[in-house]
Amino acid sequence: MGQAFSVTRRGFLAGACSLAAAPAFAPVSFAAMPGDRRFVAIILRGAMDGLHLVQPYGDKAFAGMRPTLALTPDRGLLDLDGYFGLHPDAAPLMPLWSSGELAFVNAVSTPYRDGRSHFDGQDILEAGTASADGTRTGWLNRALSVTDRSRGLRAIDVNTTMELILAGSNPVDVWEETSSIGMSPDMVGFMRRLYTEDPAFSRVFDEALRADADTERLLGTGKRRQSMDDMARFTAGMLNGDYRIAAFSIDGWDSHAQQPDVFSRAAKDLVTVLTGLKSALGSNWKNTVVLAMTEFGRTARENGSQGTDHGTGGVALVAGGDIAGGKVMGRWPGIGDGQLYEDRDLLPTQDVRALAAALLQRQFGVGADVLAGTVFPGLDRGASAEFRRI
Amino acid sequence: MAISRKTYAAIRYGYGFAPGEDGPADGDALLAQLSAAKGQVPAFLKDGAAAHLKQGIDLKVQINTADEGIREGTVDPQYKKPLIDQRNALFLTDLMERVLQAVQSPYGFHERLVAFWFDHFSISAMKNDATRFLTPLFEAEAIRPNISGRFVDLLLAAENHPGMLTFLDQDKSAGPSSEAARKRRIGLNENLGRELIELHTMGARSGYTQSDVRNAALVLTGMTVDKGRDFSAVFRPALAQPGEKVVLGKNYGGNGISQADSHAMITDLAGRPETALHICRKLVTHFIADTPPDEVVKPMLAAWKKTDGDLTAVYAAMLDHPRAWDGFGQKIKRPFDFIVSGLRAVNAGTTLQSTLPVVDMVTQDKTAKTMRDMTDGAMRRMGQPIWKPPSPAGFDEHGDAWLTPAQLAERINWARRAAALAQVKEPVALAQDVLGDVARPDTLQVIGRAPNRMQGIAMVLASAEFNRR
């Protein structure tokens, strides 16, 4: 992924034309329409530096900790609330912020502590567990079978390989904007027979045929290219059809060195996806909530190579057409003397799973007991209370 | 019906059968490959490492100079494009020759181990303009010559290679109290110190702490890359953190600044029991089953202990266990392995070779276009781009990640195109050749009834049996 794309222009268009935006694809009728609510989970792989995206310029310790990285409003930072400012790489998100369709949640993390391994960190984030216990199913998959409103919802992992967050016993399609399986009915028959004796291949082949039919209906049969913009359009197209849950990843956040360059590339992808989703979802944007989260934050101080190393507390993003956004949420712990976790990382003050749980409850009515049991084992039931206001 | 050892040797431990090639018969034959392959130059390095490196550096310098000139307005931006094309063509050549090496080598087990260890010590060519030429060299110099000797030598070669030092930012690290840090803004970078312990040796959650990670990074300071000259690994005392550093209870650095400290620490990490367990489990996961059976891991650990980490002895212990020759089909081939074994099955090695080296990035030649798309293009679409792992942990090892609708669609499409390249034109004969005795009677029957030969051949490569091992 990651083709060059004029993000700024698209961002402004998305903001300016929100009233005029129409669904990118004609509505499709289905025998049984699922509810209108939609949920998108984006995993920011590589540990996004939340302090770079949402900079606490009002904290007097900040500039000293990041001599080359810290910005201020007179050096390009986009003021959010007088204390926090948004990095200019994310400028195209400002229209969403201003209209209350975007919120940032500070100082969140999974229960993972001290290992600071990307891979364990991502596994815990996706498995939704309290520790790296080898669980091979994802919380978003388990959420599919827990309530009447979530049961049977169609979910799609926009990828060619299954990601842990959607892995599990409930069927999930794994399909990408460029996937295609053009085949004559005759050949389909032969392939079915070829896979009869192998149940796993048989099931996956049937899913591929179904996803292929959906994709053609949504995007046409023309040639499709791989880009963040197309991924957003494809995901939105599937959600405008009968999918209600989607997940995908944005890579490239591991900014150990030359952070401004590394961050800028990944931020461009994130911005393209968020503005692209809004524009292509059209009137369904108001029924959609997007949660973007990362495995952990990065060190509060910059390191010796204009970068940051693996940390703990980080930032999550929530976007959607009818959320109560336009605010920086979370319990800010400060970054001054004695306020950092192990004197190096932003102290996590809330469990990112509580945020995810609140959004699942909001979108699909999944109850607190179930959330704390099946979906997020060990999650404190009261933890999501303040996130229900989103 | 029991599946023969010859079939296991080809499919589970190699890149499958190539019609007309007599594959290894058993475990001894697999182990014999390791000594036979020793010292062989891989296809992507036939002009030699030194020439390869020089070419990479020369182009990098020319591109950087052009960039400078363009910034200052003294160079026409048009001048840069042919240089970039040349650099991309060199890399694409390397990459396709990397596939060719796996397709044409008679030593499939050796090649599979190279891929395993490259994945274990994953570095990505996409990190920057230096890793683009350092990554093939990393595989050729650090991995290939060391996969059948002692683990400690492989580890030392990998950690001290300029490819690794660049990929994990060791070239940007300096001790906070080093001479260099006192003069300019430079400091510690934990990246290599962490992955050395977490990924390359002991494994995550094996009992080390954040302070071990940081101190390991401090011990590694001084190791860097000579970027101004030949991109070799060098030790610069001015970057090294003076004083004692404790890693896992052991003290390093008490005798003044010296490269001997990082050498000693890496050697100590190689010798830890957690490391042996981590690596043996990974080997079994890679070759035999997603959940590694303890009964196979145990004798491997014993062999490791007895020989002080002699890798050939460890592989021998794995192959000596009956479970190594049982339970076919629990692993799904990853995209690289699917494509390499597919190209072998249809004998497309010489066709691939005929399109190399890549001269122009845009080609009108139909065969060249096809081969590029069926190697580099297909592996990207299937999620396993060559030499570009998504993270230092390499590519996912579990079958459920690779058996998905989008993946299967890509593989079926690939199989249909490969059918057009096939030399053997009889689908059932091809199925018997490349599936050996794992072909189910039903599978042979469906293939025999295919509406035409091309579809029959495509069905062989798309079959569940061909995708499993």
Image: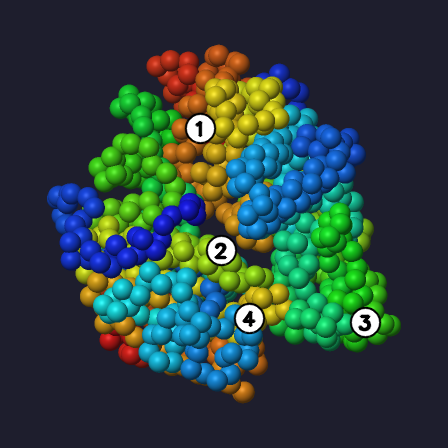
Q: Is residue A112 above or below residue B115?
A: below
Q: Amino acid at mark 1?
A: Trp
Judging depth in this view, the residue of B437 and B90 nearest the camera is B90
Q: Amino acid at mark 2?
A: Gly
Q: Is residue B199 at least partly visible in the picture?
A: yes
- Report how far apart the C-alphas of labels 3 and 1 lie in the structure: 55 Å
Q: Given the image, what chain letter belongs to the residue carrying mark 3?
A: B
- Report how far apart the C-alphas of labels 1 and 2 lie in the structure: 29 Å
Of badges 4 and 1, nearer the viewer stands: 4
Question: Residue A76 in the image: x percent, y percent?
Answer: 42, 69
Q: Given the image, what chain letter belongs to the residue carrying mark 1?
A: B
Question: Residue A204 in the image: x percent, y percent?
Answer: 36, 39
Who's the residue at 51% across and 78% down the image?
A63
Marks 3/1 same chain: yes
Of badges 2 and 3, nearer the viewer stands: 2
Report the quarter where the C terminus of chain B lies: top right
- Report how far apart the C-alphas of labels 4 and 1 lie in the structure: 48 Å
Marks 3/4 same chain: no
The crowding category of the residue bearing disc 4, from other C-alpha atoms within 10 Å (few below 14, some 14 to 19, many at least 20), is some
Mark 4 falls on what kind of element?
loop
The crowding category of the residue bearing disc 3, from other C-alpha atoms within 10 Å (few below 14, some 14 to 19, many at least 20), is many
- Report how far apart the C-alphas of labels 2 and 4 lie in the structure: 21 Å
Q: Is residue A159 at least partly visible in the picture?
A: no
Q: Which residue position is annotated with label 1?
A: B414
Q: Amino acid at mark 4?
A: Thr
Left or right of B98 on screen, residue A75: left
Q: Which residue position is annotated with label 3?
A: B253
Q: Given the image, what chain letter belongs to the residue carrying mark 4?
A: A
Who's the residue at 26% across and 69% down the image?
A98
Judging depth in this view, the residue of B140 and B200 nearest the camera is B140
Marks 2/4 same chain: yes
